[in-house]
């Protein structure tokens, strides 16, 4: 096999890969052996038709596709390695010559990592806000914790009020006929949650347990079921239960129940401290983002379209995996949202470009600053991985191949570059005006 490299405009390289006639013939024979059991011809038992006769009958190219598909992946991988290019995209393959008895030739267009010209990256000015926790924020956190520790109390001495949690049976009719999905028993509905259409919930206010109510509503014009869009409906509703949420008192007993503290004041102080730590972490990440954004603006690079396309498709694959974890296929997601794969790729493109620029700039800073990862630092990172995945350190080392270890060190160097430029940044505090 031989490979020729031609550099094109826009950081694109064309690899021309030539595979020997003998190698091509070897794969043609394998393709024949794989497919011969499916070939029938008069005068021969199935699977016994000679290859020469098959090629005469169907043409010499009958096994070309199988042979090419077998050759290209490994041949491209070998060519990419031999070229010593820093390839940053999937290849665009084009078969140039495919003919029996001749070399098999194909080209692979690939994006090459672009050169980066850095601007100012130390001492950039960024606006930051003072980090503090207000009493209102502490109270809001306490309210969340109270809600998590609330209990449900049955109410039987009054009618339904706004905010009540009801248990109902309902049966819906449109034009006097039941419709699909319009009936349920022992359904839990919070009044005021607006989880039901139109004024359904409001019409239950003032009704008592055991009472049967006719609720009149109109389906929205944009309702997901087309046959119900804009239609008036009648629901026959029976109220089975009324419950209210009882919140615990904010006192020392509450603090003892939900924390390791003896008094509510100690517990509030702990909440405030934790909220402050969270806010400081958020502020740190926000500062990093602002610093990197400014450094990217000052840097120059020519990003090839193939590189952007590869990054965007990787992001779409990650998005599809996340959807899968939530029980949705990409087909279902696109159906629900009315989007196409092409539209999703276009929407992700700006973020893909920013990710590429960020990585390229930080890698260049790591190179310029000669940021190195020591064996001790790498060992600590491996130990963190082992702790995260509840594995033995040695087992993690076994699973980490040379390429994975190299990638880890590059990621660590990039993070060091982030720390370097963030620590060197000049903070300009923003004074927020008080609202009247």
Image (spheres, rainbow, N blue to C red):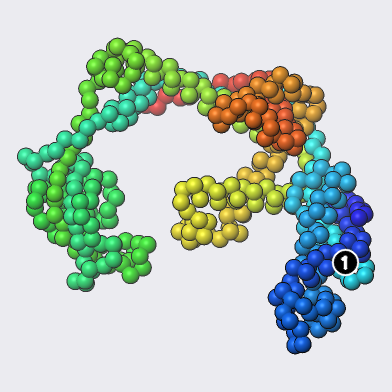
Q: Residue at the location (52% across, 47% down)?
A: 322
| Near-viewer residue (266 or 125) | 266
Q: Residue at the location (29% across, 12% down)?
A: 263
Determine the image quadrant of residue 176. Answer: bottom left
Q: Quadrant of the C terminus?
A: top left
Q: Position of residue 91 (x, y in %)?
A: 77, 54
Q: Is residue 302 left or right of residue 226?
A: right
Q: Position of residue 78 (x, y in %)?
A: 84, 49
Q: Is residue 372 above or below residue 342?
A: above
Determine the image quadrant of residue 118. Answer: top right
| Near-viewer residue (325 or 392) | 392
- For disc 1, the marked residue is 25
Q: Is residue 150 visible?
A: yes
Instruction: Assign a secondary structure to mark 1.
Output: helix
Q: Quadrant of the N terminus?
A: bottom right
Q: Position of residue 425 (x, y in %)?
A: 66, 22
């Amino acid at each position: 096999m031989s490979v020729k490299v031609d550099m094109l405009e826009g950081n694109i390289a064309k690899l021309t890969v030539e595979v020997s006639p003998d190698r091509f013939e070897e794969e043609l024979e394998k393709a024949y052996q794989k497919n011969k059991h499916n070939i029938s011809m008069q005068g021969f038992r199935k699977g016994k038709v000679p290859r020469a006769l098959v090629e005469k009958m169907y043409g010499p190219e009958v096994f070309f596709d199988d042979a090419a598909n077998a050759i290209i992946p490994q041949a491209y991988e070998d060519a990419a390695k031999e070229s010593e290019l820093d390839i940053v995209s999937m290849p665009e393959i084009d078969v140039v010559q495919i003919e029996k008895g001749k070399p098999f030739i194909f080209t692979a267009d690939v994006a090459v990592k672009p050169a980066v010209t850095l601007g100012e990256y130390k001492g950039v000015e960024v606006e930051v806000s003072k980090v503090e926790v207000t009493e209102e924020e502490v109270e809001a956190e306490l309210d969340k914790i109270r809600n998590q520790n609330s209990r449900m109390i049955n109410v039987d001495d009054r009618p339904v009020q706004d905010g009540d949690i009801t248990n109902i049976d309902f049966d819906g009719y449109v034009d006097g006929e039941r419709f699909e999905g319009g009936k349920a028993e022992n359904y839990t509905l919070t009044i005021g949650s607006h989880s039901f259409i139109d004024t359904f919930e409001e019409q239950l206010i003032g009704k008592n347990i055991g009472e049967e109510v006719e609720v009149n509503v109109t389906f929205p014009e944009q309702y997901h079921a087309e046959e119900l869009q804009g239609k008036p409906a009648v629901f026959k509703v029976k109220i089975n239960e009324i419950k209210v949420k009882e919140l615990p008192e904010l006192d020392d007993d509450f603090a003892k129940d939900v924390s390791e503290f003896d008094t509510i004041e100690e517990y509030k102080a702990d909440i405030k401290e934790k909220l402050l730590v969270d806010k400081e972490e958020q502020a740190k990440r926000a500062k990093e983002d602002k610093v990197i954004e400014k450094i990217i603006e000052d840097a120059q690079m020519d990003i090839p379209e193939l590189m952007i396309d590869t990054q965007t498709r990787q992001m779409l694959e990650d998005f599809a995996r996340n959807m899968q974890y939530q029980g949705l296929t990409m087909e279902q997601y696109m159906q629900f949202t009315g989007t196409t794969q092409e539209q999703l790729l276009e929407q992700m493109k700006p973020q893909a470009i920013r990710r590429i620029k960020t990585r390229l700039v930080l890698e260049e800073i790591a190179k310029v600053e000669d940021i190195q990862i020591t064996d001790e630092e790498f060992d600590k990172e491996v130990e963190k991985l082992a702790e995260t995945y509840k594995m033995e350190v040695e087992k993690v080392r076994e699973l980490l191949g040379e390429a994975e270890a190299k990638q880890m060190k590059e990621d660590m160097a990039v993070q060091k570059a982030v720390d370097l430029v963030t620590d060197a940044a000049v903070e300009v505090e923003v004074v927020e005006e008080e609202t009247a």
